[in-house]
Image: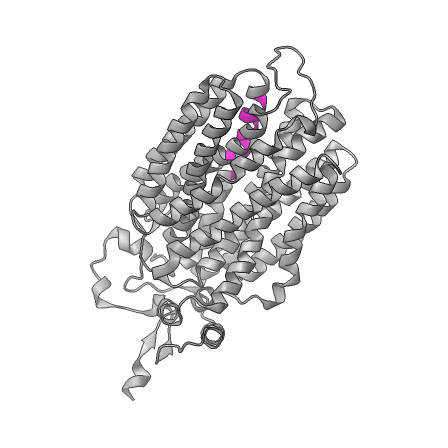
Amino acid sequence: MEDDRKTYTVDEALNALGFGKFQVFVLIYAGMGWISEAMEMMLLSFVGPAVQSTWNLSSHEESLITSVVFAGMLIGAYSWGVVADTYGRRKGFLVTAIITSGAGFLSSFAPNLTLLIILRGLVGVGLGGGPVLSSWFLEFIPAPKRGTWMVVFSAFWTLGTVLEASIAWFIMPRLGWRWLLAVSALPSSLLLLFYSMTPESPRYLCMKGRKSEALAVLEKIARVNGQKLPSGVLVSDNHIEPEEMINASEESKLVSPRENERESPKSTDSPKSGLLLMLLSPELIRSSLLLWMVFFGNAFAYYGLVLLTTELNNNNNKCIQKDMQSYNHQDISYKDVFITSFAEFPGLLISAAMVDKLGRKLSMSSMFFLCFFFLLPLVVHQPQSLTTALLFGARICITATFTIVYIYAPELYPTSVRTTGVGVASSVGRIGGMVCPLVAVSLIHGCHQTIAIFLFESVIFLSGICVCLLPFETKGRELANSLSS
């Protein structure tokens, strides 16, 4: 009879089941979505110059092709986060995969700039669902291994960037940008093919009171992994009242369960405005605002470095103050783009080595400041080999910060608002992505490289300061299910 009174949470179940074959499938599926997003983003640095040459576009029109994708992501990241927190993780990434694959393929047939911009904007809306997949994967990982496996998950992004650079190197000189758009839409189509095999997050199901469904998923994980669930009855974290949490600090309130933390129907089924207000609640407002700035700086710097690689190594960029010459894809140094793409692998290794030893905050801040020093010599023109080397080093650092912030952000928020929180932060990051083409393309074309680099440096340094001001470290802590009212 005493055994009947035993209980266990989703966290305790996942810790007992470990990381096994079931999580490997979840990793591969979510990773395919990450590859898809990386390829769609990486191709922007190739398609813009090619379309400018084909349609004789101005530098502002070329920048618009990139910026509209980020505008779509700005809308999609928040919207799909709300969908995932309200209706489930699976529904969130199903819709995003449909939109991304469909609009991505159709954009390869666009007859004019207007239709191309509309379709690329829709691709951006679909890509905004990327945080849903990362949150979904996160919720299957045992807490002790969360940092390491989230770094492994981030490796799929790097695979996507290298794959896209390789495909572009082969396709662009031979078949042109339309074929590149069509081929790059294939990974998101694979998400639809294997969608029926994906499980819902047991943590989400438990939070919604659907404990029988959550138990069924956990039992399936146990069978596939060859492990046993803890004895007792599955309960939601927010229905547990451990005495040791009575005097919890503000830090532990945000990253671990607390007494009397019960999810009312209103809070679990909050409208969009209610979920957004939760992010600005007294408990979360400081963390949210600082995190938004970090996401903005990460996206601004990362996508800016990708575009700078093509702009600074473009053989036809002569800094003529009058009418700029149009250029074609043969003028882009695909070798340099390919080389700098490989910088993401050491970035991942560095983040893997630091994230669970030094913690999330120290790892991110140190990499931001190191990136600052790598870019500093580029305030003046450098030889192409040195430019490539400096961009390689900066890409290593910003890849590490991008990897770690996507580990830190989901750990920061409770399950009830996790994908919305990460989605809103990602949306703010997309604003950085929208702005950076104006810097990387327009300023470089206008012979203002020094101003462009100084602007990048300012954003990167400020982002490092914001990381230092984040209120707490999440390394090794359990994920919370809800936020107390």
Name the quadrant of the C terminus. bottom left
Q: Position of residue 300 (x, y in %)?
A: 49, 33
Percent position of residue 166, x then y: 62, 42
Q: Which stretch did the figure color magenta?
A: 430-442
User: Where is 315 relative to 358, above or below?
Assistant: above
Residue 437 among magenta residues: yes
Direction from residue 213 to residue 118 in the image, left or right? right
In percent of width and height, residue 7 lies at: 33, 76
Q: Quadrant of residue 28?
A: bottom right
Q: Is residue 419 above or below residue 446?
A: below
Q: Is residue 292 visible?
A: no
Q: 148 or 33, which is in the foreground?
A: 148
Q: Is residue 348 left or right of residue 100?
A: left
Residue 290 at x, y percent in the picture: 37, 39
Q: Is residue 99 left or right of residue 245?
A: right
Residue ID at (46%, 52%): 275
User: Which residue in the rendered view is the most extreme toward the top?
Assistant: 322
Foreground residue, 264 or 295? Answer: 295
* Residue pictured at 47% horizontal, 35% vertical: 395
Q: Within the image, what quadrant is residue 237 found in?
A: bottom left
Report the quarter where the N terminus lies. bottom left
Report if residue 202 is visible in the image: yes
Depth order, front residue of 235/169: 169
When asked about the image quadrant of residue 463, the answer is: top left
